[in-house]
Amino acid sequence: MNRELLLNNLKSNPNKIWDVVIIGGGATGLGAAVDAASRGFETLLVEQSDFAKATSSRSTKLVHGGVRYLAQGDLSLVFEALHERGLLLQNAPHLVRNQQFIIPVYEWWEGPFYNIGMKVYDLMAGKLGLGPSQKISKEETLAAIPNLDQNGLLGGVIYYDGQFDDSRLAINLAQTAVDNGATVLNYIKAVGFTKDENGLLNGIKLLDIETNEIFFVKGKSFINAAGIFVGDIKKLDEEESANSVILSRGVHIVLDKSFLQGDSAIMIPHTSDGRVLFAVPWHNKVIIGTTDTEVKEPSLEPRASEEEINFLLNTSAKYLCKDPKREDVLSVFAGLRPLAISNGNIIPTKDISRKHQITVSLSGLITITGGKWTIYRKMAEDIIDKAILVGGLEEKECVTKNLPIHGYLKNTNFGEPLYCYGTDKIQIEETLLAANPQLKEKLHPSFPYLKAEVVWAVKNEMARTIEDFLARRVRALFLDARTSIEIAPEVAKLMAQELQKDSDWVENQIEKYTQLAQGYLL
């Protein structure tokens, strides 16, 4: 996955007509690229920033059916998500794992109520279920989560869901698309379309963010999978386009693992804002979230409000012996959900369905809105089926239900360094570590990340900036923003060697990253 090579091949063949052109390098766009390429279509994907820069790197890190949607009666979405959860565990076992959750019970009626609800959840998962739910005693609950607040605790309900690393999966999807013949490029922005004499789309105008070069690409079908920016892309096609998304901000705080002892996650089924709240172990830290706040404008770097931060701290304190304080927060990150709306309906964002919607403009632009990480594969299947119709492409069946994702490694040991690379771990060890023992050194004592991972990310994962590496190739920014700032100079030095950049680039990168990371600190 070499950007220079893929970009040069693209520009050197300006008359090539691509079957499928995808705008957006998040979960939806990358999934569509995998689907299209694996069906044998000539596929191009462009992303204005880095892969998974926006919503797709800022999730609660859960592959789940959605207990909250079950309570809302959105059964079709839960069925679909539970099925896709099972397929994702099957196709990416190096990134997706089975996670035990406990619902703490403090009222006498909660035990039977939640137990019955989770049994329904189990039944809906069918043969792709991850384990049976069960009611447990107070003693068993505390054995699983020793630092849970014991005051009034009656017991708990166990259930199972999936957990994953969102941006690592995004990178692996990009690699899977390339493995199947697609061209995927970050830092390429869609800035316009071309149309034929009938007003139908036949090309796209692209801007290389790194060089400011403009160039054109021809295509048969064009997919707008730009997430929170779908409206901007629609306006490139039709100046007067109806709004199809409403934006909801979700905020998470990250704490030291001491705040959630044991390996179980906590699910709080009802909070003051009407959402569920999770406290989930992840990369030896604990993530607490999320919130649901409507916002008006899209942003690549949304920020949490004081109200949201206080809500997470105060709500989690009700369930943990050790009350988290502001000074305990290692990182705070926010993401925007692009929720699909129709007919201008205005309802609270927490009540808007997470189902996806696909629309086609008069000129043929296919836009997908809504959805969630867990069902990215099904969303991709649906939109490529639509592209076949709109673009007049050859009918070909979707093959992604049983398509291993790049790095696929069964029986992954999640305690091993480099486990998230799957089968690429062998390549890192044989091509980098064996050739240069210095690359075995850790970037920082507080993290497991090796210098070799920086080199690998530049060579094979299209990392172009310090942020690309520290935020999304590894997760240092999200896990401990302050420590990640300390790592930045060494990362910049290693990247500069691979990218053939000078000292000015290094200084500029360190300055930009430091400024960015300070926004993740309280």
Image: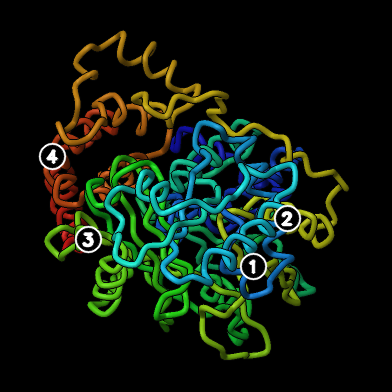
Q: Quadrant of the C terminus?
A: bottom left
Contact (Cβ within 8 Å) of mark 2 with mark 1? yes
Which color scheme is applied?
rainbow
Residue named by callout 3: 520
Report which residue position mark 1 lands on. 70
Q: Are marks 3 and 1 in contact (CB under 8 Å)?
A: no
Mark 1 Cα-neighbour bin, 10 Å: few <14, some 14–19, many ≥20: some
Q: Nearer the viewer, mark 2 or mark 3?
A: 2
Precedes in sequence: disc 1 or disc 4: 1
- Mark 3: few, some, or many residues within 10 Å (few <14, many ≥20)? many
Q: Closer to the observer: label 4 or label 2? A: 2
Residue marked by disc 2? 124
Report if residue 195 is visible in the image.
no
Q: Amino acid at mark 3?
A: Tyr
Q: Quick check: 384 left or right of 469?
A: right
Indicate which disc, 2 or 1, sits on the residue closer to the N terminus: 1
Q: Residue furthest right?
A: 395
Q: Quadrant of residue 326?
A: bottom left
